[in-house]
Amino acid sequence: MATSGFPVWWILVPVLAWIVFSLGVTLLREYRRHQVQSSRAQRAAELLDRGEPAMAEVIAFADTGQRRSASGTVWAVARLGLRVRPAGAAEPFDVEQTTSIALADLPDHAPGKMIAVRFDPASRELAVERRAGSPAYFGADVSRPCAAAKEMADA
């Protein structure tokens, strides 16, 4: 017996296929994002454990406006322009560092202040050390060398 009307499955199948495809792409993207964050956090922990200690002068400070909260503490995500002064005869170098800073510790990261860092001499990646009494480490602090950290101050 023939029925008149439009078969619903002609619409239902493509819609379901699109939903499955979109879900798959979203899950893959989130998985990759998680892998990148995990590797950054692992690298930062490795730098904090095995990196060479140094002092860094804050050249520039730019608050990104992002906030993170966990364990009863709120962190500001900030970009720091740092001039790292390694111990010994090594030349100072500039890096741009995006890091999470506890709101109570923001004044300690103002331009002109000195902060403790640990770095890898080969790659010049660094991790900012937290002062005693500061909230627990949060986020991945991994830097990249920059041509001129002073350019950040203009932004």
Image (cartoon, grey):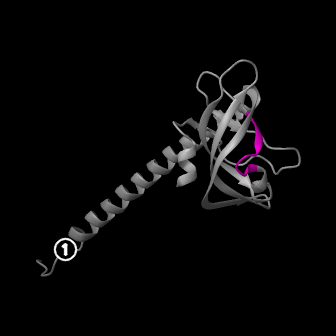
Residue at label 1?
7
Q: Does the magenta stretch include residue 114?
A: yes
Q: Position of residue 97 (x, y in %)?
A: 61, 43
Residue 71, quarter of the rendered image: bottom right
Region rendered in magenta: 109-117
* Residue at point 84%, 44% (across, down): 131
SS state under label 1: loop
Please state the horizontal and vertical placement of residue 114, each as a whole percent of the image. 77, 41
**Residue found at x 68% / y 20%:** 90
Callout 1 crowding tier (Cα within 10 Å): few <14, some 14–19, many ≥20: few
Residue 105 appears left or right of 46: right
**How far from the left and from the top, in percent, is residue 37?**
58, 44
Q: In this view, does 59 lie to the left or right of 55?
A: left
Q: In the image as oriented, which residue stretches furthest toward the bottom?
A: 4
For the image, the number of numbered tags is: 1
| Position in image of residue 141 (x %, y %) | 65, 42
Q: Which residue lies furthest to the top in this view?
A: 89
* Above or below: residue 97 compared with residue 87: below
Given residues 17 and 27, the one toward you in this image is: 27
**Is 153 colored magenta in this rendering?**
no
Amino acid at circle 1 = Pro
Q: Foreground residue, 132 or 139? A: 132
Quadrant including the N terminus: bottom left
Q: In this view, does 5 lie to the left or right of 71?
A: left
Q: Is residue 79 above or below residue 73?
A: above
Compared with 53, 97 (above or below) is below
Say which residue appears at 72% left-offset and 49% top-offset.
138
Residue at image coords 88%, 44%? 132
Q: Which of 133 and 53 is in front in this view?
A: 53
